[in-house]
Image (cartoon, rainbow, N blue to C red):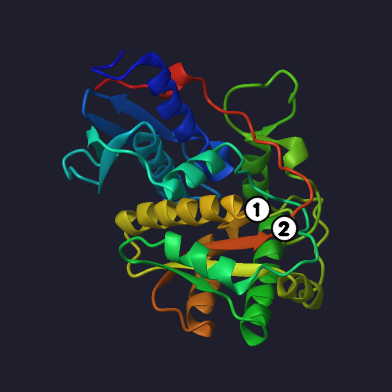
Amino acid sequence: MAGDWMKTEIEVLVQSMTRAPSVHNLQPWLLDIGPDELVVRERTELRLPHHDPRGRDRAASCGAAVANLELAIRTLGRVADVELLPDPARPEVVARLAAGTAAAPTVADLHRFSAIARRASHRAPFEDAPVPAVALRLIGETSAAPGVEARLVRPGREIAVVARLLHVAAEHFKADGAYQRELSLWTIRDEQAHRHGVGLPASRVPAGSVPWAGLIRRATELPDTAEIEARLAAESLLVFVTAGDTRSDHVRAGYAMERAWLTAVDLGLVAAVLTQPLHLAEIRSALRRDLTLSGFPQVLMRVGYSSEPDPAGPRRAVEEVLGQP
C-alpha cells in the first residue's frame, strides 16, 4: 500500500498510465504515489534525437498518461484535480494529481476508462465507411483542454495540402540513415519473448505505405501524392493545434489527444496518430500556413472504422513505473 491506496488500486493506476500512447512505445514516465497526491514525472533520459529532437512527442506522451491516470482516479471513486507542470524548480514533474474526496464516476468517465484497455494504434487501412459528423463533433468536444484545439482537416484543398506534405516528409525520412538506425534500435524482433517492456513490435510497423504504416522504413513503398490524397479523402483527419509551442503546450496536446482517442474508441472507432512529419520545420510551417491554423500543429490523428481489433504493444511492469513519493 502507498498511503490509503490498496494494492489493487495501485495496479489500476499504473496499468492505466502504461496503456497510454507514447512515442516509439517508450512509456517515458514514472509515477510517485502518496495518500492524496499522485505525481507524474517525465523520464528525460529516454531520448529519440533523430525522431523527437526537442522532446515534443515525449512530453505529449506524458500528457496522454496524465489523461488516463485522471480517469483511473475518478473510476476508483475519488475526485481528481490535475495541475500540469506545477513546479518550475522540478521540470521533470509533468503533473500533480490531487485525489480528493469520494465521488461516484460519471457514465462518461466509465465509458472512457473502459476504452483504455482497447485503445491501440491502427496502422492498417480503415474500412470504407465514413465517420458520422456527430461522432467527430463529440470527439472534438471531449478533447477540450486549455489552449488546445482539435480541428477537422477539410476535404478538398486541405486534404490535398496534407497529402503533398506527407509525401515530402516520407521521402526525407526514408533517406535519413540516422533516423532509420534509431527506428531499428527501438523495433522489437523477438516478439514472443518480449512480453513486457518498451519498443515497437516489428509486426506492428509493416513495410506498408504512407499513410497507413505511419512510420517510414527504408522498405516503405511511397505512393504518389495523388494516391495519398485519395486515401486521406476516404478517412477523417484531425489536427491538434496549440496556441503556443512550449513544453506546456506539448503536454496539453497529448492530454487532449488521448481524451479524443478514448472517445473515438468508445464510439466503436479506431485511430492512429502522425507526428513524424511535424518534426520537419518546413513541413510544420507549411501546414500551419496552408491550413490557416490558429496556432502550432502538434498531432495529426486519423480516425475510422476497422473490422479487427488492434493488438496492444508491450508494456512496462508495475515496478518499473513506480517511483518514490
Classify residue 135 by image quadrant: bottom right
Categorize mark 2 by other alpha carbons within 10 Å: few (<14), some (14-19), many (20+).
many
Q: Could you tell me residue 152's position as x and y percent?
A: 55, 74
* Element at label 1: loop
* Element at label 2: loop
Residue under circle 2? 305
- At label 1, the amino acid type is Gly
At x 41%, y 43%, the residue is 62
Q: Nearer the viewer, residue 45 or 308?
A: 308
* Quarter of the image that includes the C terminus: top left
125 displayed left or right of 58: right
- At label 2, the amino acid type is Tyr
The answer to whether any part of residue 209 appears in the image is yes
Q: Nearer the viewer, residue 88 or 75?
A: 75
Marked residue nearer the N-terminal end (1 or 2): 1
Q: Nearer the viewer, residue 91 or 267?
A: 267
Residue under circle 1? 268
Q: Are marks 1 and 2 in contact (CB under 8 Å)?
A: yes
At x 63%, y 43%, the residue is 120
Nearest to viewer (mark 1 / mark 2)? 1
